[in-house]
Image (cartoon, rainbow, N blue to C red):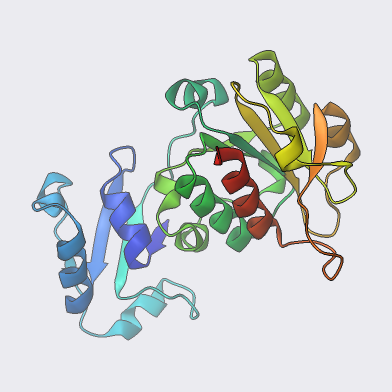
Amino acid sequence: MWLHGLHAVAAALLNPRRRLRRLLLTPDAEAALKERLPEGTFAARKLQPERVEDRARFHTFLPEDSVHQGAALLAEPLPQLALDDVLKISEGPVLLLDQVTDPRNVGAILRSAAAFGAAAVVVQDRHAPPETGALARAASGALEIVPMVREVNLARAIRHLQDGGAWVMGLTGDATRTLAEAKPSGRRVGLVLGAEGGGLRRLQRETCDELVRLPITEAMESLNVSAAAAVALYEIGRA
């Protein structure tokens, strides 16, 4: 897969779990990466950047509307991690996405997850976007920071978190209590977010420990799922 954009490429170069193949850079992009990466990064990753003088070359292998910033990296997909493994690494909250399929939304959620210290973003394997350059570009490097765990059965993943002591809340506009009122202290939080339009499905609603809402005004029916994730993560982390 081709990763593109300075943030996504820089993050992949710094991620030892990412296997790299080729790196194509314009002179300006190469200079920008050298400024933000530790000295010797290219040599440490055993990559010799290929100089691209004509930016039109990128569109021979990237979509026409790609905002590549003169940087493209051919890399292997990240190895899949099990939920149990990532829970051992971080005590942060876990986001579970119920059929959120837009890669731009998932990328933005990953970015917020990285900013607010989430342990993982869990998605249902058959109803989530694949790992692509577009997803990595939207995540602005966060795909290399926050594990995206794919589960066959989301309700089973919720129950697994509950068995481990987490309090799992589903975010929905018709809930009685707000997230601020319901969030626990002293234990891990799981937060389930549904797709725009459909919201949380019945099984996920019934499996959560509690349904909660964000206190928005009546002028708007709901927030975009990525915006809701950012607000909710801030509230969960607020003392």
Q: Quadrant of residue 120?
A: top right
Report the side of 153 relative to 75 (left or right). Answer: right
Q: Is residue 94 left or right of residue 45?
A: right
* Frontmost residue, 232 versus 108: 232
Instruction: State the count of labels.
Output: 0
In the picture provided, is 108 more to the left or to the right than 214?
left
The x, y position of residue 204, in whole percent, is: 82, 35
Instruction: Give the quarter of the image for residue 137.
Output: bottom left
Residue 236 or 49: which is nearer the viewer?
236
Q: Is residue 85 visible?
A: yes
Q: Where is residue 100? Give x, y as percent.
A: 71, 52
Asked whether residue 131 is in view, the answer is no
Query: Where's the N terminus, which quadrant?
Result: bottom left
Residue nearer the viewer, 162 or 2: 162
* Quadrant hosting residue 6: bottom left
Is residue 184 positioned above or below 145 on the image? above
Residue at horizontal 42%, vertical 41%?
A: 78
Q: Residue 21 in the image: x percent, y percent?
A: 27, 52
**Residue 162 x/y as whole percent:** 70, 19
Q: Residue at x 49, y 45 (%)?
A: 116
Question: For the point 55% across and 58% down, which residue is it?
Answer: 108
Q: Is residue 101 above or below residue 54?
A: above
x 34%, y 75%: residue = 69
Image quadrant containing the C terminus: top right
